[in-house]
Image: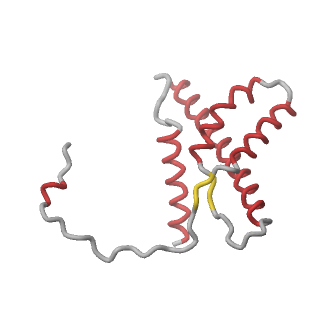
Amino acid sequence: MEIYKQRWEIEVSFKTLKSSLKFENISGYSKIAVKQDLFAQTLVYNIIKDIENSSQKIKDKINKNTKYKKKKQGKINTHIAIGLLKQKIITIFKEKETTARIKIINSLIAKLSKFYTNTSTKKSKRQENTPHRKNPTNNRKIF
C-alpha cells in the first residue's frame, strides 16, 4: 500500500507536467530545442513544487498554532501556484538584485499559503452497488 501511494504521487506529477505545464508541446524539431524545452519545463516544475512546499509548511504552521479545535486541513492548490508563478516569473528573472528576488518569491509564497483545497480526515462510504440502467444504449459514447 505504501509503494502504491508513492507511485501515485509520481503519476500526479506527470499529470501536472502534461496537462498544466503542457510538457508535450515542443517549440522546435531539433535535438537541442527538445532538450531545452525538457529542461525548462522541468526547472519550472521544480520551482513550482518548491514554492508549493514552502507555502504548505507556512499553512501547516499557522494551523498548528490556531486556537480553534477544528483545524482546517488542506493542501496547497497546484494550479493556483502555476498561475501565480506565471504572473511573477518574468519579474523574478529580470530583477538584478538577489534580495529583491527573494522578496518577490517570499511574497508569492505568503500569498499562495492562503489558497488550498480542503481535504477530509474521515473516509466516506462508497455505494454498495450502482443502480441498473434501464436502457444501456443510452450510455454509448458518440465517438
Q: Position of residue 136 (x, y in %)?
A: 14, 60
Q: Nearer the viewer, residue 4 or 91?
A: 91
Mark count: 0
Which part of the image, by quadrant, shows the C terminus? top left
Q: Residue drawn 62% across and 60% down? A: 74
Give left or right: position of 70 versus 96: left
Q: Position of residue 92 (x, y in %)?
A: 74, 30
Q: Residue drawn 55% across and 25% down? A: 32
Give left or right: position of 82 versus 129: right
Residue 87, above or below 20? above
Q: Nearer the viewer, residue 120 or 93?
A: 120
Residue 97, above or below 53? above
Q: Position of residue 62 (x, y in %)?
A: 77, 60
Q: Residue drawn 19% across and 55% down? A: 139
Give left or right: position of 72 versus 32: right
Q: Residue furthest front?
A: 68
Residue 114, above or below 120? above
Q: Position of residue 46 (x, y in %)?
A: 65, 43
Q: Residue drawn 78% across and 35% down? A: 104
Residue 129, above or below 50? below
Give left or right: position of 56 versus 8: right
Q: Which color scheme does this rendered protein use?
A: secondary structure
